[in-house]
Amino acid sequence: MIDIKDIRDTARDMLTKGEARAVIGYRRGSRGMLAEPAFITNLEQADELVWDPTCFHNLSLYLVEDRKFLAHLRKTANAPIAIVAKGCDARSIVVLMQEHYFKREDVYIIGVSCEGTGVVDERKLAPLLNGAHATSAAFDGDDFVFTTAEGEKRLPAREVMADRCLECRNPFPKEHNAVFGEDKTGRQLAEPFAALTRFEAQGNSARWDIWSRHFDRCIRCFACRSVCPMCYCDECVVDSISFPVTAETTAEDKANRIRWIERSAVRSENITYLMTRAMHLAGRCTDCGECERACPVNVPIRLLNNKMEREAREKFGYEPGASIGGSSLVASFLDSDPGDFIR
Amino acid sequence: MEKILDKKQIDGWIAALTAKSQDGWEVHAPMLEEGIWTYQPASGAVRLDHPNTNQSPKGFAFPQREIFFSFEQIKGEAPRLTQVLPKEQRHAVFGVRPCDGRGVPRMDKVFTDHVEDPYYNARRKNVAYVGLACNKPPSPNCFCLSVGGSPVSTDGLDVQLTDLGDRYFVKAITETGKALMTAGGKLFTDPSAADQKQVKQVHTDAVAHPQRKINDPDGAPAKLRASFNSPLWEEMARACIGCGICTFLCPTCHCFDINDEVQSKAPLKGQRVRTWDNCQFPDFTMHSSGHNPRENTGARLRQRVNHKFQYFHENFGMHQCTGCGRCISGCPVGIDIVAVVNKVTEHAG
């Protein structure tokens, strides 16, 4: 079990020695049990750091933000940023480094192992609390312990864990500078891609009906894109301004910009958006599952990304975020590639 | 008009409303679909046991997509524009919570006070809101009492239902509401003295339930005005990812974008449509020069909060926020409008 004191001490130590200019971690939020991202720059704040089953967020997103901010200011960093990263989060950081978004020395990874569990899925938890609202959540071996107004509620983690965590085999952040918690690499709480396999067991027409309803429900708030560390493009096909506008851009250029996707949140446009995003995540998505968690209308976005991930694994033996030096899926090929066109 | 409706009779009432011989209402009620509560066309099996709907009912008068007109240009001819007004169809929305009811007059202010928006008003005049009082706060992030509302408020509603266990206490608020109830005819019975006493007690208890609290809502407009340049904005928006959840779920956010959706280039054919827009999107304020006056999440959070608690108040004398708490519950990274307003107003001195 991880002692939060260790994470706090590491944060304090990094800041004291000037080895990190900030520590990104988790702290208690103002909404019930939920943790929220914390940006620690002074020693007192380090005491706010927490580690519990509501630490969902893939904080590597903020490394991307930081990099963009520095580029905007035309500044370079004087010290790395330290970041608390779970197994999936650390793999995202590896992908970002593979893609040369930042360098290894720009980041100090404080790895946290999810050990035998993972993060809670609020949608699974709610019915088990019978209308009560949890004010805190804690790890305890294979259980999660919640505090509610009616008292303490202990639940087997497997009953309320997010699907992504149940299916995760690598809860240990292999890439790290410091790491806390037991290495349980290879653990198997559910079959990999179990949710996808369940979904695909249905026939084509049933799947189309289900997806049609999901696509119709999407409100295009873009939370799935915004919360994703891999969606870092400065220009995105879904934005109304999908190319950089400068003082030199003519009115004609702006008027004749290509609009790939209309703003209307209707099925055709929503499909184009969600499918385009899934394609762009092939070989890059590390299944942190944040897109699906963030979705306000419960579109099972993870299934789309999982599909690509499984294709990459089955066809090419590719696992995103496995090593910084490894080649990326879409920028490499194998001599043994089954397709003739590539050779 | 005050009546009692047995819960078993609500489907009968809805059937009476939807019957063509009556006014031909299309009835909508909250249904649980894919784990979220959404308003769905209802014909039966309506049980108003929802907490609050995932999205507010603002879309009945202000849909996410509204077609203004279609256009067509045939070579050598003048362009043809055809206005597309919403279909004349009456909608009765059941189970509207008081916070969402209070959103209605706020939206009305925006779309009728200075400029009468023909599309909004064409829909609005055909929508009736059948509210449901909150016997206890449906969300841990409710704060209607902090913004001049109440769990038993009737603002914006045509009918108010109060859950009395096996029956509803039904009160008409407007003439439209009376007509809705009249359509139910004998399904409604007169309330007894005991019913009157019980509804009073339920309302008293509802208001007494603890909620989240904005500490100084009355002082907020002036204090926010004084805090425009506060460094707190950037600090509090540090985790903001710039998605549109908070405003798309909000019962009073009304910003929109207008685009031409071209269906064919030759001959040129398409539609001009209005879609919801969102002040939290980075390109919301992007100028055509490339300059963006609200270039970071701090400036964008300030816009959202100030619009709710300062600008709207200065323009219309009321907070725009109705305390439903959706933006708080829905935020993937914990940005909490109650905490933000409290922190900024406390630091404003």
Image (cartoon, coloured by chain):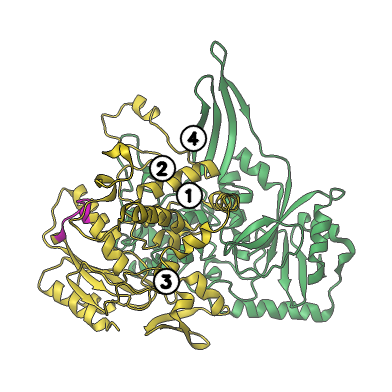
Chain colours: A yellow, B green
The crowding category of the residue bearing disc 4, from other C-alpha atoms within 10 Å (few below 14, some 14 to 19, many at least 20), is: some
Vertical relation: B209 (above or below) B239:
below
Query: Is the Cβ of the residue at disc 1 closer than 8 Å to that at disc 4?
Result: no
Which residue was labeled with disc 1?
A: A220
Mark 1 near mark 2, Cβ–Cβ under 8 Å?
Answer: yes
Regarding residue A244, the answer to whether it shows in the image is no
- Left or right of B238 in this view: B4: right
Q: In the structure shown, which secondary structural element does the residue marked by tag 1 occupy?
A: loop
Give SS at disc 2. loop
Residue type at mark 1 is Arg
Q: Residue furthest bottom?
A: A151
Numbered label attached to residue A166: 3
Which badge, 2 or 3, comes first in the chain's sequence?
3
Calculate the distance from the C-alpha at mark 4 to the C-alpha at mark 2: 14 Å
SS at badge 3? helix
**Mark 3 falls within which chain?**
A
Viewer-nearest of labels 4 and 3?
3
Residue occupied by mark 2: A238
Q: Earlier in the sequence, mark 3 or mark 1?
A: 3
Q: Nearer the viewer, mark 1 or mark 4?
A: 1
Range shown magenta:
A97-104
In magenta segment, residue A103: yes
Marks 4/2 same chain = no
* Label 2 to label 3: alpha-carbon separation: 32 Å
- Left or right: where B95 falls relative to B170: left
Pointer 2 with pointer 3, Cβ within 8 A = no
Above or below A16: residue B156: above
Which class describes the residues within 10 Å of circle 3: few (<14), some (14-19), or many (20+)? many
- Quick check: do tags 1 and 4 share a chain? no
The Cα–Cα distance between marks 1 and 4, rounded to whole angstroms, is 16 Å
